[in-house]
Image: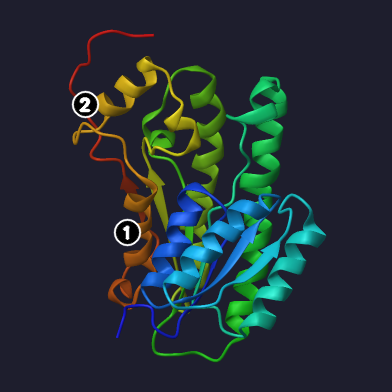
Amino acid sequence: MRPLDRHHVVVTGSSSGIGQAIATAAARSGAECLIHYRSNREGAEATAEAIRAAGSEPRLVAADLADPRDAERLVEEAFAWSPRIDAWIHNAGADVLTGAAARLSFDAKLARLWEVDVQGTIRLARSVAARMLEAPPTPLPASMLFIGWDQAVHGMEGDAGQLFGPIKAAVMAYAKSLAQTLAPRIRVNCVAPGWIRTAWGENSDPYWDARARNDALMHRWGTPEDVAAAAMYLISPQASFITGQVIEVNGGWNRKPVAGSR
């Protein structure tokens, strides 16, 4: 048996990047997957094709998590798809680094991140948890997983640090409090990626490329698949005694002095 055989897994924001890698890895581990996306239908279909190649037929649901009614519709559709959700991965977040959003003011970016990544995620998690608790208890608890950021703990200079630091710190703090609330019926953990080569990283300038490599003891960018591997462990039966944890996936935080600054 594969680790997630007969598991039903929901991955929000799974039309690209880390979410796409997590959904694909879950399917390869035997899970049935629900793919959530907001507007990137093409990306969601690409995720669906990867899941079909792994041997299962995904469910696709579009929803704007900033809209409470749309978020609740996602929950309703997910639990209609499977009355027992074994793992719900809260990966969706606002993109303020690429496209038109990158030109927004600092205040507008912060408001968007708060609306989606914090308020939207908390609202969704509370609704999902209530539904999960309605299911009959089983020997293995259900699981929730959140996505944080390693530098929310360490701190980072500049607008990016001032935007994502408080936002992801809020998500990580919420995950720990939710773990205290839902144990032992539901395990709640958080993965905190470091420098991961997603769409922004693929187009980064030489400074940020060097920064990403220097900040990791492994001296390389992380990949979405690195994050997915950690996620697969945390939602698997092998991690049944792990809850309330934040696991950094960053190649090890490099505390050695690095020459040069921006």
| Residue drawn where x is 74% and y is 53% of the image | 64
Q: Position of residue 199 (x, y in %)?
A: 49, 36
Q: Secondary structure at mark 1?
A: helix
Q: Is residue 256 left or right of residue 74?
A: left
**Above or below: residue 251 compared with residue 91:** above
* Residue placed under numbered mark 1 in the picture: 229
Q: Residues within 10 Å of mark 2 (few under 14, many from 20)?
A: few
Q: Position of residue 100 (x, y in %)?
A: 69, 27
Q: Is residue 236 left or right of residue 38?
A: left
The answer to which quarter of the image holds residue 260 is: top left
Q: Is residue 121 left or right of residue 234?
A: right
Residue 30 seen: yes
The answer to which quarter of the image holds residue 252 is: top left
Q: Residues within 10 Å of mark 1 (few under 14, many from 20)?
A: some
**Identity of the amino acid at label 2?**
Arg
| Residue drawn where x is 41% and y is 27% of the image | 155
* Residue placed under numbered mark 2 in the picture: 255
Q: Nearer the viewer, residue 244 or 72?
A: 72
The disc placed on residue 124 is: none
| Residue drawn where x is 39% and y is 36% of the image | 153
Q: Are marks 1 and 2 in contact (CB under 8 Å)?
A: no
Q: Nearer the viewer, residue 213 or 71?
A: 213
How far apart marks 1 and 2 lie (CA) works out to 25 Å
**Above or below: residue 186 compared with residue 23:** below
Q: Nearer the viewer, residue 156 or 94?
A: 94
**Identity of the amino acid at label 1?**
Ala
| Residue drawn where x is 50% and y is 58% of the image | 177
